[in-house]
């Protein structure tokens, strides 16, 4: 019996995508290992960027909340100042009215009437 003619062969299932991938790598003269390394490097870079984002997120959230509270305090302060300003304006209007009305009061408490156009009214 000839042992050379009876070689044992093993059948391995072939994935068409894997075959096409290897053929494409041969055409581009790139080894699949280089692509895997490149892919791993990109994945590592993405993971590092994600980690940096996760580290910065709590700090940024805290800064945002502090800014929000600060803006609320400023808004309340401005509202109080506006309310005070309106109150002061009303007080000034009342004071002006009182001052205008006091022009017609004598010092002895007698009310003086201001009559305009006396000559014209007397001639009628």
Image (cartoon, rainbow, N blue to C red):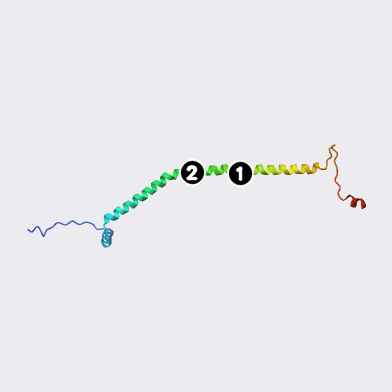
Instruction: Pick out the residue farthest to the top.
Output: 108
**In the drawing, does residue 115 fall left or right of residue 83?**
right
- The disc label shown at residue 68, or none: none
Frontmost residue, 47 versus 120: 120
Tally of numbered tags: 2
Query: Residue 8's spot in the image, x, y percent?
Result: 14, 56
**What residue lies at 32% left-to-right and 51% top-to-bottom?**
41
Instruction: Pick out the residue farthest to the left.
Output: 1
Label 1 crowd bin: few (<14), some (14–19), many (20+), radius 10 Å? few
Residue at numbered disc 1: 78
**What residue lies at 73% left-to-right and 44% top-to-bottom?**
93
CB atoms at circles 1 and 2 under 8 Å apart?
no
- The disc label shown at residue 63, or none: 2
Frontmost residue, 10 versus 37: 37
Frontmost residue, 88 versus 21: 88
Residue 56 lies in quadrant: top left
The quarter of the rendered structure image containing the N terminus is bottom left
């Amino acid at each position: 019996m000839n042992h050379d003619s009876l070689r044992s062969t093993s059948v391995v299932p072939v994935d068409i995508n894997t075959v096409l991938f290897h053929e494409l790598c041969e055409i581009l003269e790139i080894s699949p290992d280089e692509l895997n390394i490149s892919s791993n490097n990109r994945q590592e870079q993405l993971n590092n960027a994600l980690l940096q984002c996760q580290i910065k997120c709590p700090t940024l959230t805290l800064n945002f909340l502090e800014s929000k509270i600060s803006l609320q305090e400023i808004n309340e302060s401005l509202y109080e100042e506006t309310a005070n300003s309106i109150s002061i304006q009303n007080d000034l209007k009342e004071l002006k009215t009182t001052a205008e009305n006091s022009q017609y009061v004598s010092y002895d408490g007698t009310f003086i009437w201001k009559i305009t156009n006396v000559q014209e009214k007397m001639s009628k």
